[in-house]
Amino acid sequence: MKIKQVSIFIENKAGTLSAPCKLLSDAGINIVTLCLADTNDFGIMRLIVKDWQKAKKLLESKDYAVKITDVVAIEVEDRPGGLASILSVLEKSKLNVEYMYAFTSGKNGRAVLVFCFENPDEAVQILSSKGINVLGETHIFQK
């Protein structure tokens, strides 16, 4: 199970982060989680939203450079060593992590890790075969 991630390229200067967030808010699009990465001049805001098609169309209509990427979300115990145990599985399986970010789901002491892999289909297959709970959109977007 893969999830669509919206990446927005923005200038790295004061005030540029609020504009795309306001656009999405005004359109009723809720950001479930996000992460920011930056360079000196530009940044990438990566977000998970339920209606990614609507978000992409809206942002592109305002001249944002938008990219849609398949990412893999997994559930892990929110405890010391939870991430380390997942990384051990990835290392043994020779799955390279391009980037990742996390958020707590608030459900049963669990956290959600969002990974970008070169081959997300292979990652889903390997993680599932190791008994790791790979999450679909139903879990990510349920209230």
Image (spheres, grey):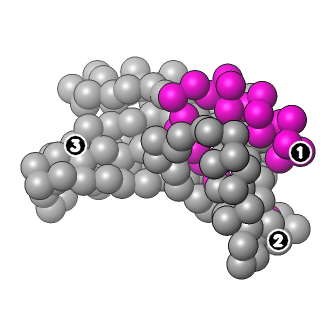
Q: Residue beneath label 2, please?
A: 109
Residue at 59% x, 59% y is 102
**Residue 50 left/right relative to 126:** left
Instruction: Using the numbered discs, state the Cα–Cα distance from disc 2 to disc 3 in whole angstroms.
Output: 34 Å
Upstream in sequence: badge 1 or badge 2: 2
Range drawn in magenta: 110-133
Tell me if label 1 and label 2 are in contact, CB under 8 Å.
no
Q: Is residue 91 magenta?
A: no
> Dot 1: what SS?
loop
User: Mark 3 belongs to which amino acid?
Assistant: Ile
Give left or right: position of 132 versus 44.
right
Of labels 2 and 3, the one closer to you: 2
Across and down, in percent, residue 22 comes to: 36, 49
Q: Residue at x 69, y 46 (%)?
A: 92
From the viewer's perspective, is 114 left or right of 130? left
- Residue 101 drawn above or below residue 115: below
Residue 96 position, x and y percent, is: 53, 40
| Three-letter code, disc 2 | Gly
Dot 2: within a 10 Å radius of its alpha carbon, few (fewer than 14), some, or many (20 or more) residues?
few
- For disc 1, the neighbor class at 10 Å (few under 14, some 14 to 19, many from 20) is few
* Residue 66 position in % (x across, y down): 33, 28
**Which residue is the site of mark 3?**
10
Question: Observer-nearest residue: 114 or 21?
Answer: 114
Q: Secondary structure at mark 2?
A: loop
Q: Residue at x 65, y 56 (%)?
A: 87
The amino acid at mark 1 is: Gly
For the image, the number of numbered tags is 3
Please tell me whether residue 110 is drawn above or below residue 135 in the rendered image.
below
Residue 76, relative to residue 51: is it above or below? below
Q: Is residue 138 left or right of residue 55?
A: right
Give me the disc on residue 131: 1
